[in-house]
Image (cartoon, grey):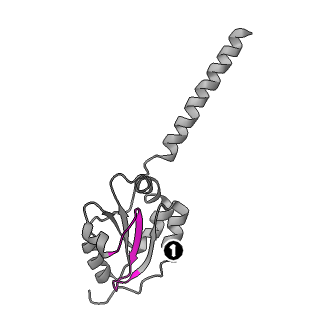
Amino acid sequence: MEKRNRSGRKGLVALGVVIPTAAFFFMNRQLTPTVAWGTDAAAALQAGQTDGKPVLLVFTGPGCPFCWRMERAVLPSAPVERELGRFIPVRVDTAADRASVQRFGIEGIPALVVVSPDGTIAARATGYHGVDEFTRFLRRVPASPAAPSGS
């Protein structure tokens, strides 16, 4: 009987280690993105004007755990990627692109800014957004008019 209790405790201890470890890896897994993200905000804004598409700027930075989490689990998620088709998506590294940080008045990260083809800010938000919240944010942005003809 004593042997049985010890083996039962070992099994519980093993489950106590395995389950949290599996949960950690599942929650922090890297999804494989299918959308091509740009890194040049100025070029994307120009392309947005030319193509008549809004530009989604996602401001992130080194050492930002919420940025890292969004980049790994939210941005490449299927619901978010479905919505990104009508945007020109750009990841802006706040440490590398200080001009964009100043231009858009970024005070905290992660930050989201949607710029309309005419150059006006259509939407903005600061802070971590999970998949559902990020998808709702994108859906609130009005559809852009058709791309200019003759371009």
Q: Give the camera-side residue of 8 and 100.
A: 100
Mark 1 highlights which residue?
139
State the quadrant of the N terminus.
top right
Residue 116 percent coordinates (x, y) = 38, 81
The relative height of residue 142 versus residue 131 in the rendered view (above or below) is below
* Name of the residue lying farthest toward the bottom: 149
Residue 124 percent coordinates (x, y) = 44, 74
**Residue drawn at point x = 32 percent, y = 79 percent:** 48
Which corner quadrant of the image does residue 97 belong to?
bottom left
Q: Kindly report the secondary structure that dominates the magenta region of the rendered protein.
A: loop
> Does 111 lie within the magenta span?
yes
The stretch of residues the image draws in magenta is 104-121
Q: How many marks?
A: 1
59 left or right of 128 in image: left
Q: SS for tag 1?
A: helix
The relative height of residue 48 versus residue 81 in the rendered view (above or below) is below
Amino acid type assigned to the residue bearing label 1 in the image: Arg
77 left or right of 3 in image: left
Q: Give the camera-side residue of 149 and 12.
A: 12
The relative height of residue 97 versus residue 86 in the rendered view (above or below) is above
User: Would you call the spot at circle 1 few (<14 residues within 10 Å), some (14-19), or many (20 or more)?
Assistant: few
91 left or right of 85 in image: left
Residue 102 percent coordinates (x, y) = 29, 72
Q: Give the camera-side residue of 144 and 67.
A: 67
